[in-house]
Image (cartoon, coloured by chain):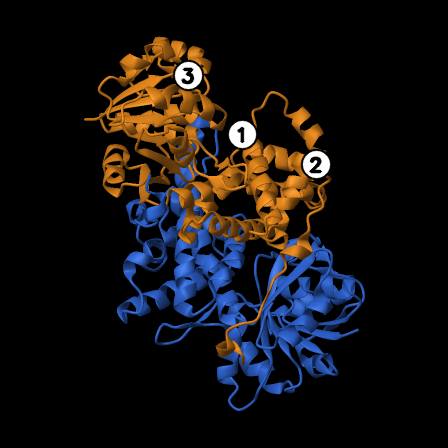
Chain colours: A orange, B blue
Amino acid sequence: MAVITVVGSGMMGSAMSYPARDNGHEVRLAGTPLDREIIAEAEKTGFHKNLKRRLPDGIKYFQIEDLEKALEGADLLIGGVSSFGVDWFSETILPVIPESLPVLSITKGMWETPEGDLISYPRLYQSRLGNKKLSLNAVGGPCTSYELADRDPTGICFCGGDIALLRKFKSWFETSYYHISLSTDVTGVECAVAMKNAYALAVSLAVGLAEKRENETGKVHYNSQACLFGQSVREMRRILALCGGLDENIVFGAGDLYVTIFGGRTRLIGTLLGRGLSFDKAMEALKGVTLESVVIAKRTASAIRKQIARRKARAEDFPLLLHIDDIISRNAPVDIPWEKFESETVDHLKDML
Amino acid sequence: MAVITVVGSGMMGSAMSYPARDNGHEVRLAGTPLDREIIAEAEKTGFHKNLKRRLPDGIKYFQIEDLEKALEGADLLIGGVSSFGVDWFSETILPVIPESLPVLSITKGMWETPEGDLISYPRLYQSRLGNKKLSLNAVGGPCTSYELADRDPTGICFCGGDIALLRKFKSWFETSYYHISLSTDVTGVECAVAMKNAYALAVSLAVGLAEKRENETGKVHYNSQACLFGQSVREMRRILALCGGLDENIVFGAGDLYVTIFGGRTRLIGTLLGRGLSFDKAMEALKGVTLESVVIAKRTASAIRKQIARRKARAEDFPLLLHIDDIISRNAPVDIPWEKFESETVDHLKDML
């Protein structure tokens, strides 16, 4: 039995307690200063107010003041903050934990350097730690928290530098519904799944665009979504190559893109934009909803624009991403550049009939 | 203006008349012996009884007896038969057309040789022609006929041996809603999009499997579909490599997989199987529905099994396809081998922190 401490009791951090508890591990759920109410209610009733589900029995709950107690004798620290909590996590938590305590981060997205390079959170964290050495690992791949809580089968990937350690984590979390691949290509895994934020928004533009025709015919339309999905896969592979990640990770990226298109808030904003609302108006309509994916999308586009300026990348390889960026960063109207997705391949003499 | 003759007035063959007529070409729609009623009604009323839409104005209609007149002076022959009409098309039509008339085939799927190689229909047709040389081209990629008829934006690929000829076809069919990529890799394009039949069935198994949990929670579940989608992309790329197609074609395959999952009959059978019905029972429930995709899926699996037997491929690389084959060819119950989708990648020393 391992002792697993989760810092950050948002939906995904808390959902990790299902496979951990089902495997009989001790789970300590520690809230950030923003999670005070979640922890207070879960401790009293066992119910997670945002996940809207009963958490597994036997979890120990901690407010942030009791962090030291939560960390005592822990075998693994799960970094459960959203991308908005990355600074807090790296400034408040990482400096106080022992080097012997490995970290598994569930935070989505990549960090943009001033030069426009995209780096994974484990790499960002390490760069901020100075001489301190930590084992920094991450989870990537298609997994929504409420479905994990419902024990719906899902396949994700743990990534980190030490395959033996990753195998140990896998032995702790693998269940009949939580299926874990392993990879030492942290950049590749994290890059592939971060990209889906921009591209899920892109594919869902077609949902809004098609509504008029659907109202006329009563049939839901998918051709345009499929075209944008294919183009997304194409551009995601190019970004993966730019970041130096292995191409095979597109499997996690495509799966994560698929689930994100159907997963709620990102689809909502894409659909509103596709209907003809400006980005500002669409954000107004969704007031109060935190759109982590929009922030990640902006950051990805900003990084690629800088790489284009540095001639590390070519604008014509990313027509869809740049259009999304025009929409969300410059309030441009939706005008999908379909022609720019057309390719011409001359190859394979063997096929000439 | 070109003269475009379509032989086979099913839904997709007929839908090709929208971009052709919108560009001002002469379109001659010739029915197969099975299309007699479609042609008779469309000639009288302009309405296509299966597509359930008014066809563009100005089409000239022909019953099969008048084929010779339909072919007179034609610049392009569109092969509009389904995969069930391939023998008829290659025995009845191809032998009577002049070598100067190029063919563009919309038939989905690949042909299985006795050795278990998968070959494209253009290649099959050529092999049956003996000394006669025809320009045999094909259309691949995500496109449902009724959406094409509704002029919903879509992106597909014309493939064939002569890029100059493909460019001419593109100039005839490209519209504001029909976006055409070109490729001389016929095997790659056709293989990528044929695979989606088996895998769309696979992904939709998760729809049926999740229904119980969805009824409990009232939320649609996507994690399992996303896992199967990712695994499908992985296996499709492997099949593409086995067939000798370019890997880039996965863009068309992934897009076509996406649209097929939502496109109707294939999803229906996958969902029924996921709910627990045996294949025989599921087919009974869908009695009267032609499941071209099931036939294509069986053929793909059969070919891969033969290649495994010949040690050209490894069974462990295709766990999802082989499970689908067990279900549809051996009436096996659904029992998705999630663990077999887990991968382990040790690479990228640069990422070791």
Residue farthest to the bottom, as pictured: B131
Ranked by sequence position, the earlier of labels 1 and 2 is 1
Residue at 42 percent of width and 46 percent of height: A188
Query: How many numbered discs sit on the rendered protein?
Result: 3
The residue where tag 2 is placed is A330
Residue contact between numbered discs 1 and 3, judged by CB atoms under 8 Å: no
The residue where tag 3 is placed is A32
Q: Nearer the viewer, residue A233 or A21?
A: A233
Question: The residue under label 1 is which amino acid type?
Answer: Glu
The part of the image, by quadrant, that contains residue B71 is bottom right
The residue where tag 1 is placed is A292
**Nearer to us: label 1 or label 2:** 2
Residue at 47 percent of width and 69 percent of height: B110
Q: Nearer the viewer, residue A232 or B170?
A: A232
The secondary structure type at the circle numbered 1 is: helix
Residue contact between numbered discs 1 and 2, judged by CB atoms under 8 Å: no
> Could you tell me if residue B41 is visible in this image?
no
Label 2 crowd bin: few (<14), some (14–19), many (20+), radius 10 Å: few
Question: The residue under label 3 is which amino acid type?
Answer: Thr
In the depicted structure, whether residue B126 falls above or below residue B117: below
In the depicted structure, whether residue B18 falls above or below residue A302: below
Question: The residue under label 2 is which amino acid type?
Answer: Arg
The quadrant in which the N terminus of chain B is found is: bottom right
Judge if badges 2 and 3 mark residues of a common chain.
Answer: yes
- CA gap between label 1 and label 2 equals 18 Å
Residue A268 left/right relative to A181: right
Residue contact between numbered discs 2 and 3, judged by CB atoms under 8 Å: no
In the depicted structure, whether residue A229 falls above or below residue B6: above
Ranked by sequence position, the earlier of labels 1 and 3 is 3
